Image (cartoon, helix red, strand yellow):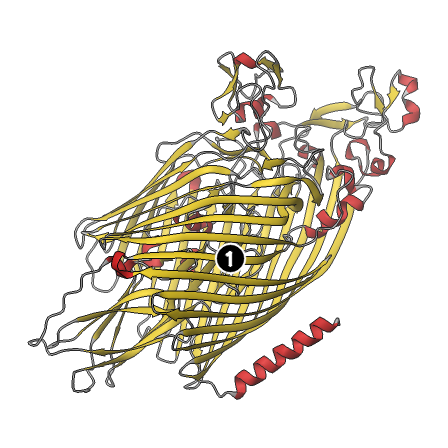
Amino acid sequence: MPTIYGKIFRLFSLFVVVGVALQVHAAQGGNAGSVRGSVTDPSGAVIPGASVHLSSSISGLSRTATSGADGQFEIANIPFATYRLNVSAAGFAATSQSVDLRSVVGSTVKVILQIASSSTTVTVESSGDLVENDPTFHTDVDRDLFLKVPLESQSSSLSALVTQTTPGVAADSNGLFHGLGDHASNSFSVDGQSITDQQSKVFSNQIPSDSIQSLQVISGAPPAEYGGKTSLVIVATTRSGQGINVPTGSIGTSYGSFGSTSGNFDISYGGKDWGNFFEADALNTGRFLDPPEFKVFHAKGNEQNFFDRIDRTLTQVDSMHLDLNFSRSWFQTPNAYDNLNVQNVVSGGTTADPVYANVGNTDQHSEIKTFNVSPTYTRIVNDSSVLNVGAFVRRDEYHYYPSGNPLADLGPTNLQTSSIKQSRTLTNAAVHADISYAHGIHSVKAGVQYGQTFLRENDWLGVVDAELNAPCVDASGASVAGLSSTAQCATYGYSVNSAYLTVLAPYDLTRGGSDYYFHGQTDVKELALYAEDQIKAGNWLFNLGLREDIYNGLTKANQLEPRVGIAYNVKPSATVLRASYARTLETPFNENLVLSSNGCADAVLSPLLSCSSGVSSTMAPGYRNEFHAGFQQGIHGWAVVSGEYIWKYTHNAFDFSVLGNTPITFPIDWHNAKIPGWAMNVSVPERHNFSAYVVMSSVAARFFNPQVAGAGATVATSNSAFRIDHDEKYNQDTHLQYQFGRRGPWVGWNWRYDSGMVSGSVPYATSSNGTVDLSGLTYDQQAQAGLTCGGVEATRTKGFSSCAASQYGSTLVSIPAPGTENDDKNPPRIAPRNLFDASLGKQNIFRANRYKVDLTLTAINLTNKYAPYNFLSTFSGTHYVTPRDLSAKVSLNF
């Protein structure tokens, strides 16, 4: 073991031993804490039965408790934020105060209620109650709010929730979201468990949104405790059954467009010292993934989720917490019209006259199984300190299956030339410990995590394009199907194909070959050690942090990362000014890492993966410096505006490339990236039954050639900048919500505007008097891009081989004027789009006391907007937004 590992492991051991020796007394760990306290009268006598209400008008959190016989109360599982605490009791005047929760140590408050006749307290929320004196830009969302937000994707509802409530997010297909200019550099922290692997539904199964109690999405400079993928850190707190003395839960079912049906069940139950929350749900739909056509076919899928959270207080100072999760999904790879009635060689593949015939429709599909177990032990050291020690194992099993007849996997030459089968596993196993200390002006947290990611990849590839590796070419230089040796060319009047690779011949399925098998594996070891202190001094708040990341995978890296932030609260104007800086280690994506790193060194895989000379075979971690400056402004108690400007500079910037017409993608690495932009959040707390929020952003994604590692993509000859395919000039989400009376129905409304992501695969004119070559696109692909020539729009059966620049255009893509295209300043983009969603609901429609029935109606893409997310993206291909989707859900709550 290297010396550095030995030193840090010894430090880790000392850290744990000292923490236990402190005889600490324990509470709740993870991403949440408790608000506890006592309620007394002015003489100090305890007041039992007092009503305690904790709320946040920004996140929507609302929790209640009742003081016990000793006047004590506790509200557990509360995310870190600033809250309003209201306390009332019969015969006493109600009182209200602000509570700042910043640590798992929790907050302890002492509430003194005055005799009703001596004073009267009226709580009016001021602008100061709405702002948080925090250097880190973030968005808080509680379950009470997001239950009423119409979500675009049922199969990845957590991703949809983040996209619709968080500024700085570019919405992509299949539940993917790009945070603040980076390609999916997002991580989840679920009850203290770090998940940095991809969470799009083509990679993994997400934790079900029904299991989530609250989210805090960190868009600012990440605190020292977070590493890995940190453009967005989604801090999730799950639901708990502790303290719920009467079993509480719900049973629901829904039906909607595309034959979509779902069912869900959850129950919470517990006592003072224990609790259990269990959730199960299932979905079956005819549109699981976003297809490359607006019309939906061959896009079926289903999903099942099981989640269980167990809490147990062992002694007055010791407690345990356990998360268990299993999910399974099965889904088809959506077809384009080009995938129907595929014509391919059925006989005579090695003769001069191969026979072509219909080999059927492309029929590719995937199955993903995800398992997760995460136990945490918590011990309260004293009133100021809490120790957490935990571990987790998370495993994704991904299986991709080709068509029954692999020859049916043939797509257009610019899309898929191989039939592919894959079976891979990604297993994360880690141990972690942290200790939190809160006293006076300090909130300190220090921790360590050691983990290993076990990657096992198995791939089978076979050539299904008879012209991809043809031995012979005709007089025009075009490849000729058939024949099996360059020695045969002259016999039939052909020339030898200088690009012919004999190494591929055994794996050409059109010429009687078989699949090529690739096996790759590696164990990625990662060690992190961090310490941070949040110092509150008057109106100032300082974040000081330091993190050390050691990465040992296919390559090695060691990075010391300072994280600092400062905020100042101008209380008279309810203004918070803030600035922050972070240094981060940027590590490669784990999905298909071995294939992308080693594939180009493989003589067979290199041409199939579109490898280019001059690109390293192994991806090395990079590093980033990011700077943030922002503000938060309360407006007369009825709104709060929060904004941030961002500068991010990355050396070795990661991206993905796609393998044919499949969901199989692999990481690639560009030389560097510069990402400037801004993000803003406007929240209107509920007032007179109305609430709203608006999130908006403009974030550039400027990457720079050359490609330095990985397979696929195209290496440019210069070091010029270009906009990566998820770069978007501007987007915004507006959500409006209104409740009709105390018992009436509620209505929600969403408006999403996207200016359009980069679409670099769309042809453009280089001069005003030239022509645009469209021969590289099939007619169906031209129709997918909405291409027009002379006012005539391409269809899937009739298109253009070329078009005069003056006649060329598109109804779905914004194409630069002739001679003005610039990969950095003016690339082709998907045309701007407006999407509208609506929801209507009624709680307790029968006005029952115990068993309450809720009804919710949801409409996604209400106007049936016809628009793509992207077109022939190097990452994900072509996908369309969801057509109008109507659904109804009935829930029984008990």
In the image: residue 693, left or right of residue 579: left
Give the total of numbered labels: 1
Q: Could you tell me which quadrant the C terminus lies in? A: bottom left
- Dividing the picture into quarters, in which one does residue 838 lie? top left
In the image: residue 575, left or right of residue 370: left
Q: Which residue is drawn at 53% across and 85% down?
A: 20
Q: How far across and down, in percent of the image, does residue 143 sit?
A: 35, 58
- Dividing the picture into quarters, in which one does residue 273 lie? bottom left
The foreground one among 310 and 232 is 232
Q: Could you tell me which quadrant the N terminus lies in? A: bottom right
The image shows residue 607, relative to residue 818, as above or below, that is: below
The foreground one among 885 and 61 is 61
Label 1 amino acid? Tyr
Q: How far across and down, in percent of the image, does residue 194 sit?
A: 54, 63
Q: Residue at x 61, y 82 (%)?
A: 14
Q: Residue at x 60, y 44 (%)?
A: 673
Residue 213 is at least partly visible in this image: no
The image shows residue 834, relative to residue 320, as above or below, that is: above
- Dividing the picture into quarters, in which one does residue 832 lie? top left
The furthest residue to the left: 117
Q: How far across and down, in percent of the image, does residue 366 sit?
A: 60, 46
In the image: residue 845, left or right of residue 773: left
Mark 1, secondary structure of its residue: strand
Q: How far across and down, in percent of the image, does residue 592 sit?
A: 67, 50
Residue 700 is at least partly visible in this image: yes
Residue pointed to by mark 1: 581
Q: Are there few (<14), some (14-19), or many (20+) residues within 10 Å of tag 1? A: many
